[in-house]
Image: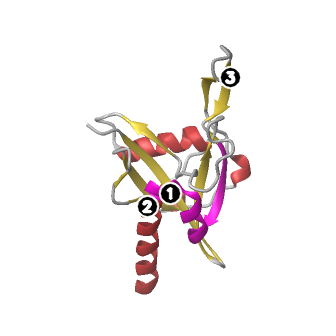
Amino acid sequence: MAKQSAGLLLYRRTASGIEVLLAHPGGPFWMKKDLGAWSIPKGEFLEGEEPLAAAQREFLEEIGQRVDPAVAGSFRALTPCKQPSRKVIHAFAIEADLDVATIRSNTFEAEWPPHSGRTQSFPEVDRAQWFALDEARQRIQPGQVPILDELARLLSGQSAAS
């Protein structure tokens, strides 16, 4: 069975349009990467775990905050997105705001520099930022662009219905 990840896609409405929250992965591999490196806050989950519960857990681990649907509104399940690696991402969109200066990520251990025998601690996410949808499409990992496209379609349909 293919690996599965689940994550939350926060969005907010601004005077200039829709913005989405993306996270930049921490650690030395991602340090100097930008375009095509960002992601929705997400992580793997095991068979039997509910994807939405996993998405909320991963958001808390990577961003350090909970998203309360009672305050923010309801989670909207997006179509699962198959990655080039065959991993499937289950994304849940929710309209909410968050101050990116307050994120606090879990850490992981890695040998760095390579073959040095020294282990260092790195944050899973080194920063998060709000991006307009067009810029987000450039920043996000290419396999996750369909997640942004689906959100845009849903929100444009919602605006038309309003």
Question: Quick one: which residue is furthest to the front in this view?
Answer: 115
Q: Quadrant of the N terminus?
A: top left
Q: First in sequence, mark 1 or 2: give its number.
A: 1
Q: Nearer the viewer, mark 3 or mark 1?
A: 3
Q: Using residue 134 as the reference point, say whether residue 75 is left or right of it.
A: left
Q: Do the residues labelled 3 and 1 touch (CB within 8 Å)?
A: no
Which secondary structure lies at badge 3? strand
Q: Do the residues labelled 1 and 2 touch (CB within 8 Å)?
A: yes
Cα–Cα span, label 2 and label 3: 33 Å
Q: What residue type is labelled 3?
A: Gln
Cα–Cα span, label 3 and label 1: 30 Å
Question: Quick one: which residue is furthest to the top in this view?
Answer: 117
Q: Name the residue under label 1.
A: 9
Q: Using residue 22 as the reference point, say whether residue 104 is left or right of it.
A: right
Residue 146, placed above or below residue 61: below
Q: Where is residue 155 in the image (x, y as percent from the top left)?
A: 46, 74
**Residue at the spot x=33%, y=59% of the render?**
79
Q: In which quarter of the image is the C terminus?
A: bottom left
Q: Residue 120 carries which label?
A: 3
Which secondary structure lies at badge 1? strand
Q: Name the residue under label 2.
A: 147
Range shown magenta: 126-144
Q: What residue type is labelled 1?
A: Leu
Q: Where is residue 61 in the image (x, y as percent from the top left)?
A: 56, 37
